[in-house]
Image (tube, helix red, strand yellow):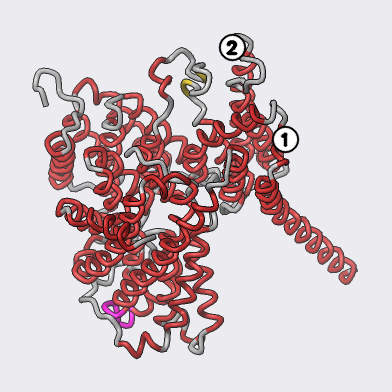
Amino acid sequence: MSLDVLLSGASYMVDPMAVLIMVLATFLGMFVGALPGLGTVTALAMILPFTYVLSAPQAIGMLLAIYCSSVYGGAIPALLINVPGTPQSAATTFDAYPMAKKGLAAEALGWVTAASTLGGIFSLIVLTLAAPQLAAVAVRFGSIEIFALIVFSLTTIAWVSRGNPFKGLLAGVIGVFLATIGVDEMSGVSRFTFGNFALSAGFHIVPILIGLFALSEVFSTAGRGAQTLAKPIVSTGFRVAPFYEWAIRWKTLLRSSAIGTFLGILPGVGATAASLISYAQARAASPRKENFGQGEPEGVIASEASNNAVTGGALVPTLALGIPGDAPTAVMLGALIIHGITPGIQLFSRNPDLVSFIFVALLVANVMMFFAGMLGAQLFSRVLQLPHAVVMAVVVALSLAGSYVIRFSMLDVAVAVIAGIVGVLLRYAGVPLAPIVIGFVLGRPLEVNLRQGLILTDMNPLGFFKSPIACVLFAITAIVVVYPLLKQIAKIRRSKQTDSNGDATTA
Amino acid sequence: MARFVNTDTILGAVFLFLGVALFRVTLAVKDSVFVLEGDAPPYLVPQIYLYLWIAISAVILAGGLRGRSGAMPSIAWRRFLGVISLVIVGATLMPFIGFLISGTATVFGVGWTLGFRRTGVLAGIAVASIVSIWALLVFFARMPLPVTPGLGW
C-alpha cells in the first residue's frame, strides 16, 4: 500500500465529527465491555442502527472504536471484581485480580491498558501487510472457489465451537437457512414467506443480532435468578509500569500478540481461546512461572495483548475475502454492506482509500483506547456499581427502538423478540449463537456461488473438484471435521481399555 | 423415561420436526416453479440445507436418547416468563400507544421484575432513558419512532 493511499485514507480523520464519534464510541465500548454479560457483539448490535445516519467512514470509525474498546473494557471487571466483562478477558482474572487485591489496582489497569493497546497495534501492522496480499491471491477465485472457501470457514467456525460440535453445525445451518427466506434474487420466487408480503424482503441482520445477543442476554439474566457479585475494588488511578519492567517481559508481549493475531485470522477460534492459549504459553515460557496466578504482570500481558490482537487478525479475512472470522467481525461485515461497501476481493482495488482509512481508524481506535483507559479508570470502576437490573431494562428499550428504526417495520421488532426467545432457549440447550449470525451473513454468497458453480458445471457437483483451489479447501474442511472425530473415538477406546484393565485388576 | 427428557432430546426433536415440516413445504411448492433447462432450481439450496438440518437434528436427538447430554437447566421461571411477557407486551403495544409510553412502561416493568425495587429511582431512570433514546433517534438521527396517537410524540 503506497504512502499516498495511506495519507488519503488518513484524510478522513480530519473530519472533527468522525473523531468526536470515535471518542464517544471508545467510551461507550469500554462501558458496555465493562458490564458483565453484555460484551462486544451486543455493543456492536445495539449501536448498528445508529450508524444509518452517519457517513461510511464515520460509521466504520465508530464500529472499530467500539470493537477494540469493548474487548479492552472486559478486563476492567476482571481486575476489579474477578468477573470478566467479556469471555475474552477470562484469563485476565488469573493475575489482574490478585494484583488489585494486593492494592495494585492502578498498576494492573496500567498493564492491562498498555498491553491491550500494543497487542492491537501489532495486529494492525499484520493486517496492513497481510490483507492486501490475501486479497491479491483471492482475485483468482471464481464461484466454485468462493463456495469452497465459505464452506471451509463456516464448517470450521461451527465445528470448533464450544461443547457439542453438532450443535455448532446446527447453528450454522439455521443461519444459512434463514438467509434463504424471502424473494430469491436469481429466480424471483418467494421462498418460505407463507403468503406474508413483509417477509418478501427477507430478514435483516440487525434484528436477528439484537434478538440473539442483546435480548437473549436479558432473558438469560432473568432466568438465572438473583445474583450477587463481589464488592468492586475501586481503582484509585492508572499507572503504567516503568520501562525496565516492560523490558524483561517484551518476549511475552510479542509472543502473545502474534498468537492473538494468528488465531484471529483463523475462522472460529476467537479471542477467548487466544487469551487462554497465550496465558498458558506465557506461563510455560516464563522464568517467573511460580508467580502466575498470584498477580504476575506477565499473565496480564499475555491475556490482554492476545485478545486485543485478535481484532486486527480477524479483520484480515473479513476485509480481504469478505468472510468473517468471528461474531464481532460478522457484525462489522454486515455494517459495511449496509453502508454500500462490499468487503472482499474488489474492495482493495476499488476502494483503496477506504481500506487505508480502516487501517488508520484502527490505529486511532487503539490509541484512543489507551487514553480513555487512562482518563476513565476511576469512572469505569464505578460502572460496576450500577444495578444490573436497570442496565438490562435499558438494553430492552434500546433493542426495541434499534430493531424498529432499521426499516421502520414492526416485523423487525417481532423478529428481534422472537430471535431473543429462540436465542435464550438455544443457550439453555448449549447451542452457540455466533454460527447462526455468521451463517446468516454468509448464507446469501454461499447460495449464489453454489448455484453459479452448478450452472458452470452443467449441474454436476463433481465438477467442483476440477478446481485445484476448491479441492484443497474441501480437503482441509474434511480434515477439520474428521480429525476431532477420530481423536474422540480414540479417547473413548482408550477409556474403555483403561476400564477393562481396571476391572481385570480388581477381579 | 426421565433420562430421555434432557436438553438434547428436546432440541433434536423440535428441530427434526421443524426440518421435516419445512422440507415438506419445499416439496409442495417446487413443482409450481418454472426452471430453465440447466438452471439451478430456487429450492435446491434450501433443500440441501434442510437435509443437513434434519441429519444433524437426528444425531443430536440420538445422543439425547442415549442419555449423553447434560441435565435440564435450572431456571427462575417466574422472572424469566415475566420479563419475556413484558417485552412481548411492550413490543406489541408500541405501534398503538407510541414508543415513549410503551418503552417507559417496559423499562420500569423489566427493572422491577429483575429485582430493582426503588420505585422512584426506577421510574426516573425509565423516563430518562426512554427520552434520551427518543431524542437521539428522532431529533438527532431523524429516524421516527412510533408516536402516541393524538399527541404526535
| Residue placed most toward the observer, A224 or A255 | A255
Q: Is residue A298 above or below residue B66?
A: below
Secondary structure, mark 1, is: helix
Q: Residue at x 49, y 60 (%)?
A: A264
Q: Residue at x 59, y 27 (%)?
A: B46
Task: Give the x, y percent position of residue A404.
Answer: 28, 30
Depth-wise, is mark 1 or mark 2 nearer the camera? 1
Camera sees residue B108: no
- Label 2 marks which chain's residue? B
Task: Give the x, y percent position of residue B141.
Answer: 17, 37
Q: Is residue A469 above or below residue B82?
A: below
Camera sees residue B84: yes
Identify residue for label 2: B33
Identify residue for label 1: A463
Q: Is residue A118 above or below residue B102?
A: below
Location of the C terminus of chain A by quadrant is bottom right
Magenta segment, principal secondary structure?
helix
In the rendered image, residues at marks 1 and 2 fall on the same chain: no
Residue A106 is a magenta residue: yes
Residue B10 is a magenta residue: no
The magenta segment: A100-107
Q: Is residue A485 above or below residue A240?
A: above
